[in-house]
Amino acid sequence: MREAPTIVLIGAGSTSFGLTTLHDLYADPVFDGATVWLVDLDAGALERMRDLAGALEAATGRGITVRLATDRADALPGADAVVVSVEVDRDRRWQLDFEIPRRHGVEHVLGENAGPGGLAHALRTIPLVAGIAHDVERLAPNALLINFTNPEGRICTAFRRHLDQPIIGLCHEVQLARQRFSGLLGRPIDCRAAGLNHLTALVAASDATTGADVTDELHAAVDALRDGDGETYSFVRYLHDRFGVVIATSDSHAGEYYREAVEYAPPKDFLGRQVKMRELVDGVRDSIVAGRMDMAPFLEWEASEPLRPLLRASISGEPERIASAILPNDGLVPALPNDCAVEVSAVANGAGVAGDRTDDLPLAFAATLRHEVAIQQLLSDAALLGSRDAALQALLLDPIVGSSGAAEAILADFQAAHRDLWPALT
């Protein structure tokens, strides 16, 4: 990627995505002189983000040119990187994804990335991101395409299965886990991670300063995980006790893949949490724009997103370690089919992202991953080929559902509820 790149942020009006990404661009001198396109269908949200960018420019003098577009076709030509974080009618649809399975006796903890709720979510967002990707391929064929849209594993597997276009998925969960366990061990650690997005294991760990192996200490620290900030870890500790795996998320995400999770983790108040998060982020943004924020500590703050080091490495050509990336499984996790996308620790450089190889996953954990991959592959066929049979088979295979009658009823209700945003299934 060239110096002073053109970076397109699609979904830039999103509360957390917009703030954290603009923070990272203005906090780092490597982005001096860049052109940043903010793209969103909501013109009002774009104006708010433009005001934020103006305040950050005044504080840093980066010389970043900010442009706005409600039509992505206006922003894409000449792009060096395109970053996507998009949803439609997010909160209301998520509530439906959660409540419809419960009407048919299926309890689950979150309903976002796996289970029946993850199916409904994927059938809305896979075609959405694929449509953006087609425009990127047409208008900016050399651009680095980066996705933050959930359910990331299912989206990236759909690209691997049906689209030739490269895409990199990024998620902060593994980085947050690395920070969490660094605190428990009392020193910074690096981790080798492998799995599927939101079900990724920390397979090995080393002292970030000395390089000494601390994997045994990592396993011992699982018992010290304590609930807080709205997150619980009872189910994470259960998975470690029974399967010997250190999961890099809290109960809410890990529990999406296991039927027994509801015995350990109560259903998440995700809508209440979304409201609180937006209030917090909006308050930070408003304080910056109004000049009430002390900018020095804000700019020194290290966000947990891996986007900044990835883009920095692409510009400088200097390799940088990133906690994880969601990549095509070109032998990175031999226990899983190549026809999927895996989340692994990685190194970013001027040529792209190279993932770490892991061939020592615990057997029972690998079996869970293989089962989920089959579901993801079927969902890819449903989303991009319009196969209703594939969607139903995905629900019938899903361990969260556990009933053929429930699977049929859930799919019918989902089709009725999301018909305007789902592909036509025949």
Image (cartoon, helix red, strand yellow):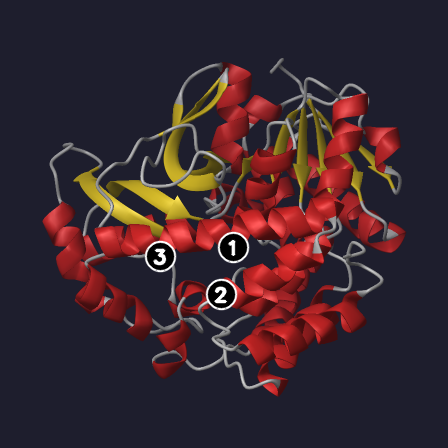
Quadrant occupied by the N terminus: top right
Q: Which mark is residue 407?
A: none
Q: Which mark is residue 398?
A: 2
Looking at the rendered structure, the kind of residue marked 3 is Thr
Q: Position of residue 109 (x, y in %)?
A: 48, 75
Q: CA distance from mark 1 to mark 2?
A: 7 Å
Quadrant housing residue 233: bottom left
Q: Position of residue 292 (x, y in %)?
A: 65, 57
Q: Position of residue 17 (x, y in %)?
A: 64, 49
- Circle 3 sits in a helix, a strand or a loop, which is it? helix
**Residue 52 shows up from this direction:** no
Q: Are marks 3 and 2 in contact (CB under 8 Å)?
A: no
In the image, 73 versus 63, the foreground residue is: 73
Looking at the rendered structure, the kind of residue marked 1 is Ile
Name the residue that disc number 3 marks: 368
Of the image marks 3 and 1, the number of the one nearer the N terminus = 3
Q: CA distance from mark 3 to mark 2?
A: 11 Å
Of the image marks 3 and 2, the number of the one nearer the N terminus = 3
